[in-house]
Image (spheres, rainbow, N blue to C red):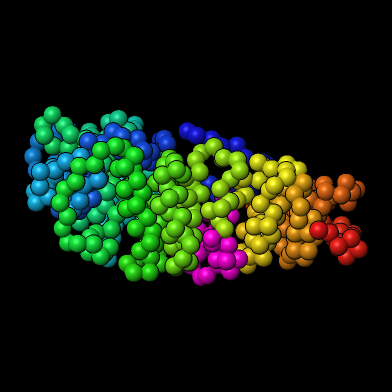
Amino acid sequence: MLICLFALSIRPSPAPPIMGPVAFAGAYPNVPTMVKNSGLILIGKVVHSPLEAPIKTQPAKKATSNDSQYAIQAERVIKGQLSSLAAPVAVSQPLDIVVCVRSDPSTGLPVRKIWEDAPPDDPGYAGPALTEERIPPRLTKSIKASANSSKRKHSGTRPGLEKNVHGIFFLKKLSSGSYEFVDPGHPVLPALGLGTTGQPGSRPAQSLTGDESSLRQTVDELAQVLSSYSAALDAAHHESICDEIVDDFYQIPKQITFPVLRPLSKSGDPHKRLWITMCMLTSDGPYPSFPPPWESIEPVTDVLVSPPANTNLVVEKIAHWIDSRNHLYGKAEGGPVPLMGELLRSSNVAIRRAAARIVRGCTGTEGAQKSLATQGLNDNDAEVRWTSMSGLAEITGRKDYCPPEPKYLHETDTEPQYDVPAKYLDFWRTWAAKNNPQ
């Protein structure tokens, strides 16, 4: 499991709920590896699913009939060859699939849920097979079935893909002539149907050489889903699906994603622009680059300053990404002070807090004093004011007026308290009025 260490000032994300006795693996799909290991990548729809057959108490260990195979009707091919798009592609039902993928009724896009596996020490367990509460995608994508799952009795919904799920399928060919999923933990990624995107109703099968070309087309398909907000999806579906797509970009290099996504982030629906920006930031990789790709945020500065309704989830994600880069700066010159100064005007407090911490780390950059003194000190949030005061104390050397460290005052506190005695804020506001910092 990849662990990134950030500065202590970063606000930790709430721990996700753990559902039952599960084992955790990698949290994100490795799309470049999935592309590389695929003999066939197609966009299409599940027209037959083993889930249509009666649920058996002892699932078959091998795919021996059509009842234990998926039939996927291909619409277009990203990698590999098909002699015809007319005949469905047979895909074996893997024993270790760990998600329940349902079809969104309005778009056919995959909606993934955790399949609640039985405890390894209780082969006869017949508890609920599917959690009804939607679980964050990072959990959906990190659960593995235990080794003896094929021997247990199951009740309710089984793991697998239901009929009419539409998306991108990554397949490898078996000696039997049928296919299997390259990664059973991520059997399908979202993609719009031809009718939804306004493309022709049919397209001949393609044979594309080069994994990079296939990866670029995969990114383009995901981008089409992100861009479809105003036309195809309502707010609830959009938030859920886009949140999963962000994770899909985690392992895709920015050299592939930026050329596709950057033009889409500059105009159009603000919800779409924010989610596309978050995907670009995610593709910066597990190890933050320096300097970070601040230019990806610049086109959506206006949206982040005045976020529209129903954007809290993606705005909070962008704020956390900004905050996670503050450890890259320490009295740095050439930091993104003008951009962060703009974000200090945001109506979203998480954005302002993250921007203030970045500016505090750029004490050697022109404009840092002005941003902290004229905007940060007058913010209505105690944490932003505290960050601004500590930054000014560092810049001016007046450590005697550096505010005390925030403390947890009560056992029930979920966040430290940033309120400090009034003398600190009074001092810095008086200093700012006299010195007119630049």
Q: Which quadrant would the C terminus be assigned to in this image?
A: bottom right
The correct choice, above or below, for 246 with respect to 7 in the image is: below
Location of residue 123 (image quadrant):
top left
Q: Is residue 71 magenta?
A: no
Seen in the image, is 146 located left or right of residue 341? left
- Of residues 150 and 394, the one nearer the viewer is 394
The residue under the point 77% across, 46% down is 364
Residue at image x 78%, y 50%?
391
Q: Determine whether, in the image, residue 410 is placed left or right of residue 78.
A: right
The answer to whether residue 347 is seen in the rendering is yes
Q: Is residue 254 left or right of residue 113?
A: right
Residue 422, position as x, y percentages in the image: 86, 61
Q: Is residue 46 left or right of residue 321?
A: left
Q: Position of residue 240 (x, y in %)?
A: 40, 58
Q: Residue at x 31, y 37 (%)?
A: 211
Q: Main secondary structure of the magenta part?
A: helix
Examine the rendered structure and indicate whether residue 21 appears above or below residue 157: above
Q: Which residues are magenta?
A: 299-321
Pinpoint residue 168: horizontal percent, then vertical percent. Answer: 27, 48
Question: Which residue is at 47% across, 50% downward?
Answer: 280
Task: Assess whether residue 315 is covered by the magenta stretch.
Answer: yes
* Residue 243: x %, y % from top left: 43, 54
User: Residue 21, can we see it?
Assistant: no
The foreground one among 361 and 419 is 361
Q: Count up the numbered dots.
A: 0
